[in-house]
Image: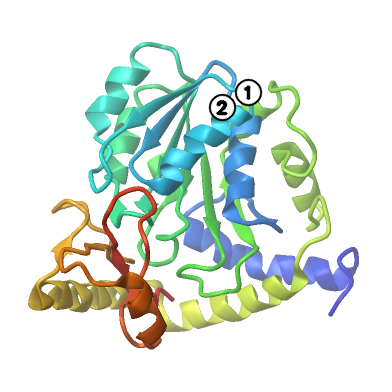
Amino acid sequence: MIGHRGEDFKNLYRAIHPGLQTLFGTKQPVFLSTSSAWGVMEASIRNLVDRGVLCCMCGAFSDKWFDVAKRCGKEAVPLQVDWGKHIDQKAIDRQLATGKFDTVTLIHNETSTGVVNPLPEICCTLAKYPDVALVLDTVSSFSGVRIDMDALGIDVMLTGAQKALALPPGFSLFSVSGKAFDRAEKIPNRGFYFDFLEFKKQRAEWMTPSTPSIAHMHALQSKLEEIFEEGLDARFARHERTNTLVHNWVRRTGFEFFAEKGFRSKTLTCVKNNKEIDEKASRKTSSGDRPRLRQNSRQNLSPFQHGRRN
C-alpha cells in the first residue's frame, strides 16, 4: 500500500494514464472514481444538464438513468423502446430538433437485454446539434470493442471496472470533453465528490478529489499490461470469436435471442427463457464454465449471459 497524497501515487497514476487514454480513444484526461459507474452516471446529470436531458431507454440500466435524472431535479424526457429493441438515431433526431434538450444519455451496450445501440449513427446525428452533450455508458462494452471517444464526439464516456476489465467492482473510469467542461462551469450545485471541475483540477497534479482505491489502481495497471501485451486488435477479435461461439450455442440448443437481429452485443448475450427453465434451480447447479442465468426483473423472461467478459 502507498500513500494517496505522495509521489508514489502520482507515479502510479502517471503510469496507467496513457494506456487508459488509448482504450478511451481520447487525448482528454481520464479520471478515476472510487464508486460504481452509477456515481459517474449521476455526476453527468448534475454537471451537464441545464435545459433538459433526453434519456434513451431500452433496458433496466437506461431506464434507471431516467429516474436518476428526475431525482436530481432535472427536466428529463424518456425516449423509450421495448426491451430487446435498439435506440433509433432518427428518433433522437426528432427529439433534438425541438430544442428542448442540451444533454442526451445513452447506454452503448445495455447489459439487461444484450442490445448494442448503433453508436456511429447516433453520434452522426448528435453532430447536427453542437450544443447538445452526449453522455455514454460503456460499462459492458469498454475494452471489449473499439470505441473512439474523440473521433465520435462523445462528451462524457464512462465505464466500470468489473466487466470486460475483469477487476473487482466499486471503481469506475471516465473522460470528459472540453465542451462538457465548459458546460460544467456554468452549472450550479454540482456538489463536490463528483464535480467534474474538481476531477480536472486534481488530475492536473496527478491526484484525485477524494481518497482513491489504490488497490484498484494497482490491479488496473496489471490489467493494462495484459491488454496491451495481447494487442487491442487481437483482444477485440477474441471477443468476437467468443461471441460467435455463444451465439452458435444459442441456436444449437434451441433458445431464442432476446436482442433483435443486427443489434446484438459482442460482449454479452441474452436469450429468452423460451424453454421455461427453473432459473433458481439452474443457478444453484450451474458451474462457472457454463452460461450464467440472470433474472430479467421487468419481463417474464430470463436472459442468459455468458459471464466471462474479460
Residue 149 marker: none
The quadrant in which residue 290 appears is: bottom left
Residue drawn at (62%, 46%), measured in percent from left and top?
40
Q: What kind of element bears circle 1? A: loop
* Residue labelled with disc 2: 70
- Say whether residue 11 is left or right of residue 64: right
Is residue 280 visible in the rendered structure shown here?
A: yes
Q: Amino acid at mark 1?
A: Gly
Q: Look at the numbered discs 2 and 1 and tell me whether their residues touch, using CB distance below 8 Å.
A: yes
Q: Image height check: is 159 above or below 64?
A: below
Picture coordinates of residue 216, whole percent (x, y):
68, 72
Q: Is residue 236 visible?
A: no
Distance (Cα) linking label 2 and label 1: 5 Å
**Considering the numbered disc 2 on the image, is that residue within a helix, a strand or a loop?**
helix
Tell whether 122 sits left or right of 140: left
| x and y percentages locating residue 20 in the rendered image | 57, 63
Total tally of numbered discs in the picture:
2
Q: Residue at x 58, y 53 (%)?
A: 37
Q: Quadrant of residue 256?
A: bottom left
Amino acid type indicated by mark 2: Lys
Q: Is residue 10 left or right of residue 298?
A: right
Label 1 packing within 10 angstroms: few (<14), some (14-19), many (20+)? few
Locate residue 182, reporting x and y percent: 64, 27
Front residue of 48/6: it is: 48
Where, quadrant-wise, is the C terminus in this rendering?
bottom left
Q: Nearer the viewer, residue 101 or 252?
A: 252
Q: Is residue 39 above or below residue 184?
A: below
Quarter containing the N terminus: bottom right
Q: Pointer 1: what residue? A: 73
Q: Is residue 206 left or right of residue 115?
A: right
Q: Give residue 234's position: percent from left, percent from top.
A: 33, 78
